[in-house]
Image: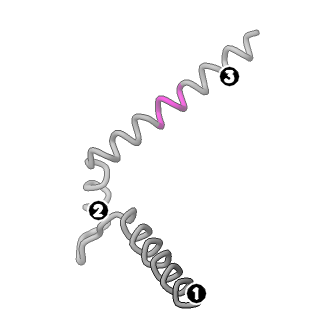
Amino acid sequence: MRNRIIVIGLVAFLAFALGSRASRPEIKNRESVRHQLVRIWNDPKERKRRRKAAEKTAKKVRRALERARS
């Protein structure tokens, strides 16, 4: 029973460690900060994330304006 708990704990720790590493942006050594920002800005996933955030914010602003006018 004790061995089973240790194995489950080890698997959970490895899953957490690998999952937390997967979400980090990959930064190459000796790459300037400006170049990193340009690379991240042009990344298709980041463009999609920015577009969705802008749409969500615009929707909230429209709702707030409608409530203020009422």
Name the amino acid type tagged 3: Ala
Q: Earlier in the sequence, mark 2 or mark 3?
A: 2
Give the foreground label among 1 and 2.
1
Q: Alpha-carbon neighbours of circle 1 within 10 Å: few (<14), some, or many (≥20)? A: few
Q: Is residue 43 above or below residue 4?
A: above
Distance from disc 2 to disc 3, alpha carbons, whole Å, reads 36 Å
Could you classify mark 3 by the number of other residues whose Cα lies within 10 Å: few (under 14), some (14-19), or many (20 or more)?
A: few
Q: Residue at x 48, y 37 (%)?
A: 53
Q: What residue appears at the point 53 percent right and 81 percent down from the top-left corner?
A: 9
State the CA–CA distance, disc 1 to disc 2: 49 Å
Residue at horizontal 67%, vertical 14%? 66
The kind of residue tagged 2 is: Gln
What secondary structure predominates along the stretch shown in magenta?
helix
Residue 62 against residue 7 in the figure, above or below = above
Question: Residue 15's x, y, as percent?
Answer: 43, 72
Q: Are marks 2 and 3 in contact (CB under 8 Å)?
A: no
Q: Which residue is mark 2?
A: 36
Q: Quick one: label 2, few (<14), some, or many (20+) residues within 10 Å?
A: some
Instruction: Give how far across and how far down residue 6 sits, in percent.
Output: 53, 87
Image: magenta residue range: 53-58
Q: Earlier in the sequence, mark 3 or mark 1?
A: 1
Q: Secondary structure at mark 1?
A: loop
The x, y position of residue 23, in whole percent, is 39, 62
Quarter of the figure with residue 20: bottom left
Q: Residue furthest top?
A: 70
**Compared with residue 49, is residue 39 higher up or lower down, i.e. above or below?**
below
Residue at mark 1: 1
